Image (cartoon, rainbow, N blue to C red):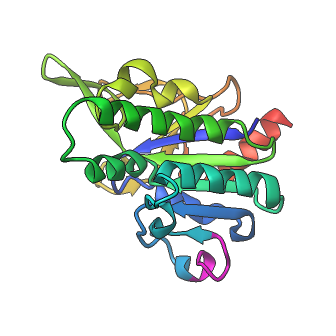
Amino acid sequence: MSNLVLILGESGSGKSTSIKGLDPKETIVFNILGKRLPFKSSNSLYNTENKNLIGKDKFEDTVEKKAHENIIDRIHVVSEKMPNIKNIVIDDATYIMRREFFSHVNEKGYDKYNNLADHFRKVIDACAIQRDDLNIFMLMHMETVESDGSIITYKSSSVGKLLDKLYKPEENTAITLVAMPKFDDKGAASYGFYTHRCIVNGIEIPAKTPAEMFSEDFIPNDLALVVKAMNEYYN
């Protein structure tokens, strides 16, 4: 069973930047949107020549397979045939759903939403059953949850309501980190991950980690620190 980690955060919250701490020789990034990675020297560290960056062209629908099937197949290949790879980062996993939605946007009826939910569920299930020493990080956008016009918490961003009601990604991972910067009295930001459920400015942060894995509620946004904590905790 692999170590599946869900990382939620708004755009610009430091999700993708957290990749920079990982060893590029042990990491493969599934770049769902084909964006440049937002840290110094990322182009030389992660690229097709190094075989550690897979772009969006590899996750398109084909005659033979849907995009989610291509992703699942590549996860299996890494797990079964690439023992040197210890980390898979899916950035941004939200767009597995969003891109499929827009490819079927003109279709009427609810079947497309059922398919979206089922396909994303299959990706999460595939991530969870890989080899024991493989860490899989699913970076996702989050959105607010409101009650009576006020924000009460956050959740993973999805398309349609089926995933929210029947198969919430947060409920199917043991670790959910929330990327959210803290600001000091001068407005300077410290980027990091919340590790435990807590209240910040009256809003519940839906982070969770196994008991005693992290002593701090807020850690730097560095996936290498997360890998170290998981290795020490489980092994």
x and y, in percent, of residue 210 in the image = 67, 26
In the rendered structure, does residue 49 fall within the stretch colored magenta? yes
Q: In this figure, what is the number of numbered marks?
A: 0
Q: Residue furthest top?
A: 148
Q: Residue furthest left?
A: 149
x and y, in percent, of residue 31 in the image = 49, 63
The N terminus lies in quadrant: top right
Decide if residue 18 is in sight here.
Answer: yes
| In the displayed structure image, the side of residue 124 where residue 204 appears, left or right | left
Closest to the observer, 14 or 92: 92
Q: Residue at x 44, y 54 (%)?
A: 92
Q: Residue furthest right?
A: 235
Vertical comparison of 60 with 96: above or below: below
| In the displayed structure image, the side of residue 4 where residue 9 appears, left or right | left
Closest to the observer, 102 or 27: 102
Q: Residue at x 21, y 42 (%)?
A: 107
Q: Image quadrant of residue 195?
A: top right
Q: Which residue range is magenta in the image?
A: 44-52
The C terminus lies in quadrant: top right
Closest to the observer, 68 or 131: 68
x and y, in percent, of residue 168 in the image = 45, 26
Q: In terms of secondary structure, what is the magenta stretch mainly?
A: loop
| In the displayed structure image, the side of residue 123 where residue 210 appears, left or right | right
Q: Image quadrant of residue 141?
A: top left
Decide if residue 179 is in sight here.
Answer: no
In the rendered structure, does residue 50 fall within the stretch colored magenta? yes
